Every structure is written in C-alpha cells, then in structure tokens.
Amino acid sequence: MDPSAQAAAGKDQVREEVAQETGKSSVEMDDAVEDMMKNLKLTAAEAGRLVDDDEEELEKPMWTLAGKILSEPKVFHINTISAAPRPVWGNPKGLLFRDGGRNMFIAELDSERDQDRIWERSPWTVNKCAVVLENFHHRSRPSEMRFDKLMIWVRVIDLPYNKLNGIWGERIAKKVGEFVKLDINKDGLVSAQYLRARVYIKVKDPLMRWVGLESVKLGKTFWYSIQYEFLPYFCFSCGVLGHSDTVCPTPSERDEVGNLPWGPFLRAPNDLKKKNGPPFAEGGYDEFYTDLNKDTERTDTRDLDSGEPSDKPPFRAPLGGRGRGRNGNARGGGNCQSIGSCQWYLLVQIPKLTKERRIM
C-alpha cells in the first residue's frame, strides 16, 4: 500500500475510534481527527500536503447513488451487482457501476430524473436481498456512508375508521419508522381499508410487527398488525433484514407449535395493481395467467386473482425487442420495453402456466 493510502486508512481508523468514543457529529469528528493527527509523528514526506481549493468541479454534473446489499454472510461480485438492477431500473442512459467494497457499489447516472426515480421507488432487491441506498456526492467517501435505513411502504391493518385520516395516520406511521408521507386522498382521508404510509425503517432493528393504541376511555390497549410491501429477505428468528434464521447471531426459541417470532405474515399481499407501481417484478404490472399446451401456444387467458376466464385476448410477443433464439430464449439479453403502441412482455416459466407481466 502506498503512503497516501496508508495515511488515508489511518485517518479513517482514527475517525471511527473518535466517533465510537465521543458520539460526535461528522463536523466535530473531523475537527477531533485533525487535532489527533497533529499529535502524530509524521515524516517529512508525510507532512507534505496537496492543496484543494474546493473550486474544481466535474465537467458535467454527476448524479450518483451508493448502495449496499444486505446479504450476510453471502458476498456478491460487482458483476452480479451491476447486472441485477440494470433491467428493473429501465437501463437508464449512462448507468455505470463501481465497486464500493463488500456488497457495496456506486451507481453513476446521466440525469437527476433517473436518480430521483430510482430513489423514490425503493426498496430494490438483488436475489431478494435488500439494497439500501444513500445519496452520494462526488466529494463523499465510501467510509462516510451509513446504509442504516430503508424506505418502504407499510400498512397498519384493521384500524378504526376514525383513525384512517392524515392526523392519526402520521402519528401511527411515526411509531413504525421515520415518516415520509401517507397514501391519502385530497380530503386527507385514507381510501383503503388500511393505513398505508411511506417510512424509513432502521435496517439493524427488528421489524415492527404490531403498533399499540391505548384507549384512555376503555382503559385498554388495542394492537394492530403491520405489513410491509415488497419486503426483502429477513430473519424469522430476530426480525432483522439481511440474513436467515439459520445463521442468526441472536436466535429465538420457537413457540409450542414450532413458529418463530417473525414470519411471512409481515409481507403485504400484492393487491396494488397499476397504482403506485412497485419497483420490481412482483408488482406494478397488469398480471394474468395463460394456460399452455405442448406447443406453448397461449390459449385460455385467466385472471390472476379469481382464476376465471379473462376477456384479455391471447397473444404472442418477443422479450426485450431483439427476437428469440431457436431454444425460445431472448437473444441479446434485452430488457422489457414499451415502444410506441407495441406491447413487450416478460415471461416467467412456472409449472403448467406462464405468468405474463405487461408493463403499462
């Protein structure tokens, strides 16, 4: 390692030690690190410094996001990390991935619009593992990224009707996580049968399963279930994102029927279609099933929820816009697109059925 890299590593180590010992802010921590560095014995070569006048800027604006995949103990290669998000992000122009360390990456984009769109449609996943995003300025350092919270839609189920409004909705949402916004109408009321809120949850904390409302009049506490939309991989033993119960550092005991404290009941059903489309393949599309015969010709189109015959006509369409090879696979790895009035489809093979997702 060259001397400049060693100095940077030493300063980062000092920074971490000061942060742990003092709990100071980044500005205060920088001042403390600077004071500590003054007390170190530096060689003549180390004492020489480069001057940064803070006026040099990039030739063009850089729209950048930093990301970390929560997948302990599994480690993803940067090639896997860069290949997985690209198609579901819409393959934005100029997208470039850089390795940011263990399961971390830096994504550079050409436009602020693409950056905002990707940020707002969190959570994203790689192999069902959560991707935690951070805004990354070109003067930031990877060591300054915290990756400590994930933005997600949550639902609070079976609330009384007098609590399905903006005032109570915000209060309840703040119990679940850091409040962002509510899904309410122009009159400030919840139009669904449940409260739906956008919040940041801390990735190192167990997922909340219930929220309690204490009634002063009745002298009783009522508990309401919480569900998370498109919830990534999490531990059923401790409720923390990023690992399974088989490798949980703080395993829990099972109850009398063998269930762990957390479970799939925290996942919200995918009943939001064409509204607030989710960021990856499980939703945000017009979904339906089609039966296949031996020749893979689509015949009987059925509704996804009811299983009844649908009025949607059967059809055939290529994947990704580059045609299909002899074995039926898409050539060129093109991603799903909508070009003019022509509909393009992503086909996912499942037993006896093909699930077609039409991007609207």
Image (spheres, helix red, strand yellow):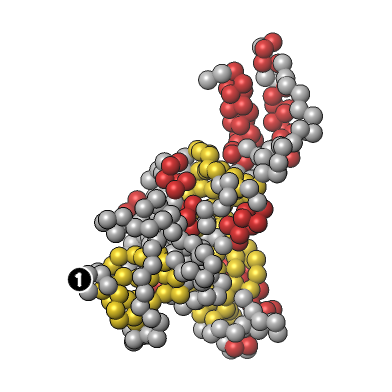
Furthest-left residue in this view: 294
Residue in the picture at 63% in, 88% down: 162
- Residues packed near mark 1 inside 10 Å, few (<14), some (14 to 19) or many (20 plus): few
The answer to whether any part of residue 70 appears in the image is no
Q: Secondary structure at mark 1?
A: loop
Position in image of residue 185 (x %, y %): 66, 81
Q: Residue sitting at 31 percent across and 55 percent down?
A: 325
Instruction: Work out whether residue 304 or residue 344 is closer to the camera in this orientation and state it.
Output: 344
Residue type at tag 1: Lys
Query: Can residue 349 be seen by looking at this rendering?
Result: yes
Q: Residue at x 59, y 31 (%)?
A: 13
Say above or below: 218 vs 199.
Answer: below
At x 38% / y 45%, what residue is drawn?
74
In this rendered view, identify the residue nearer to me: 343 or 208.
343
Q: Nearer the viewer, residue 4 or 40?
A: 4
> Picture coordinates of residue 354 (x, y %)?
31, 70
Q: Is residue 314 above or below residue 179?
A: below
Q: Is residue 97 above or below residue 112?
A: above
The x and y percentages for residue 77 are 41, 41
> Which is more toward the observer, 139 or 109?
109
Q: Disc 1 marks which residue?
A: 294
